[in-house]
Image: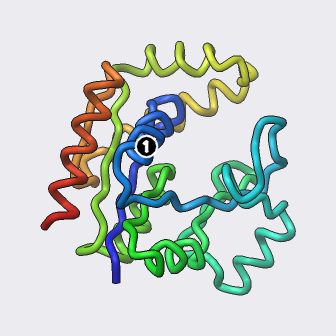
Amino acid sequence: MGKLIVISAPSGSGKTSIVSYLLKNMETLSFSISACSRVKRENEIEGKDYHFLGIEGFKRSIKEDSFLEWEEVYKNQFYGTLKSEVERIWSEGKTVIFDVDVVGGLNIKKQYPKECLSIFIMPPSVEVLAERLIGRGSESDESLQKRLDKAEEEISQNQEFDTVILNDDLSIACEETQEVITNFIKS
């Protein structure tokens, strides 16, 4: 059995940027592509960004016990980790890295307490988070408020993770995260 790295954070905290940095700089890591029920966005690629299953396909996969973890994040918006992704990466002799929400990250950690390092990326503040989300230009007022409410709830769970890394400077956060992961893989 290999090792797993969970990177979790509220939406807009920089976890995807940090994971991208890690994948470029650590050849031992391989990204676990999440599955989702939502429609593919214009710039996304099936099997690279997500496995786009649709609502019915996602529900069928739940019944077939295909997921390591899954969650209905919002009504009929499902996200999850396929067991086949973990098996694929371990069969390549690599360490699995996840970019998942807080609930998903904690669920993975519960299933693999010794093999998993869980890292929480902490935003400098909820205000900075709001600025980052607004800067994306992809949020309606309603979805922005949903994400900010969820962010406050997720931030309150940061102590359940093995490590918390503050992302007020992306390059420093990337380096700190890489160091923590390198030490974990060597142990």
Q: Quadrant of residue 21?
A: top left
Mark 1 burial class by Cα count in 10 Å: few <14, some 14-19, many 20+: few
Q: Is residue 76 visible?
A: no
Q: Nearer the viewer, residue 40 or 89?
A: 89
Q: Amino acid at mark 1?
A: Lys
* Image quadrant occupied by the N terminus: bottom left
Q: Residue at x 78, y 36 (%)?
A: 43
Q: Residue at x 61, y 61 (%)?
A: 71
Q: Nearer the viewer, residue 172 or 167?
A: 172
The residue where tag 1 is placed is 24
Q: Is residue 19 visible?
A: yes
Q: In the rendering, at what x and y percent does residue 70 appear?
A: 59, 66
Query: From the viewer's perspective, is 49 left or right of 159?
Result: right
Q: Nearer the viewer, residue 159 or 124?
A: 124
Q: In the rendering, at what x and y percent does residue 140 appear?
A: 75, 22
* Image quadrant occupied by the C terminus: bottom left
Say if 23 sits above or below 53 in the image.
above
Q: Residue at x 39, y 49 (%)?
A: 7
